[in-house]
Amino acid sequence: MVDHVLIDALTLESRDFAAKWKDAIRKAPQLKRYNALDDSRLIDEGAGIFPLLSRTLDRGFDRSLMGEFFVKMGKDRMAESFPVSEVIYSIDLAQKIFIEYVMTEFAPENPVRMYSSMGILTQAAEFFLLGCFYLTKGFLEATYTQMNSKDSVSEELLKKYFRDDFFFKIR
């Protein structure tokens, strides 16, 4: 069972986590598109991830909820012309912010928390990996749709390069 101090922190301090995420993005020169955003937009973007992580750690994986969140993120970032590599790297930075918090603020309090932190970090790694999976699905689905409708790329050519049979599905 996950300690509710951690669950509460992720939910109640989501904007603080997002501010740390924003700072990490500002230090990453390879995130050119993200660095073009103003600070408040970055914090707003990051603030949604941590309550979802909190809910996942507290109640278990809800693939429908996670899929909806990350597929939408992927579609939105594609529509805004973000490179998919930047979006995935930004998720990795969010994971690093969480790991840093667990290892510096949460785990050291006592041996029981240190031990439970190992399980928490494993669950968080699954959360972020699954998030990237759904994010990529959403990004590619939006790319496929745009190429098919706006760029008039033939269905035959699209099927040649987009081999994924899970488009337009969340699960």
Image (tube, rainbow, N blue to C red):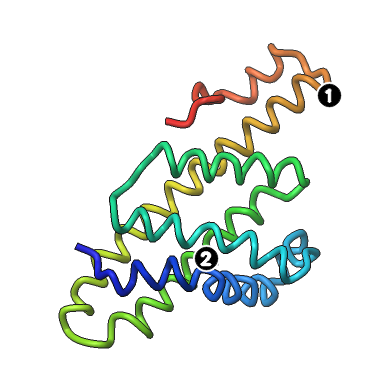
State the mark number for residue 77: none
User: In the rendering, at what x and y percent does residue 165 appear?
Assistant: 50, 21
For mark 1, does the 10 Å Cα neighbourhood hold few (<14), some (14 to 19), or many (20 or more) residues?
few
Disc 2 marks a residue whose amino acid type is Ala
> SS class of the residue under badge 1?
loop
Q: Do the CB atoms of the residues marked 2 and 1 lie less than 8 Å apart? A: no
- Mark sitting on residue 151: 1
Q: Residue 56 appears at what percent x and percent y?
A: 35, 53
Q: Is residue 98 above or below residue 109?
A: above
Figure check: 84 above or below 145: below
* Residue neighbourhood size for the residue with mark 2, other residues' Cα within 10 Å, grouped as few (<14), some (14–19), many (≥20): many
**From the viewer's perspective, is 75 left or right of 105?**
right
Q: Residue 50: horizontal and vertical position, in percent?
A: 47, 62
Res. 113 image quadrant? bottom left
The residue shown at (35%, 42%) is 62
Q: Position of residue 42 (x, y in %)?
A: 68, 65
Q: Quadrant of residue 29?
A: bottom right
Q: Quadrant of the C terminus?
A: top left
Q: Which residue is mark 2?
A: 94
Among numbered discs 2 and 1, the one appearing first in the sequence: 2
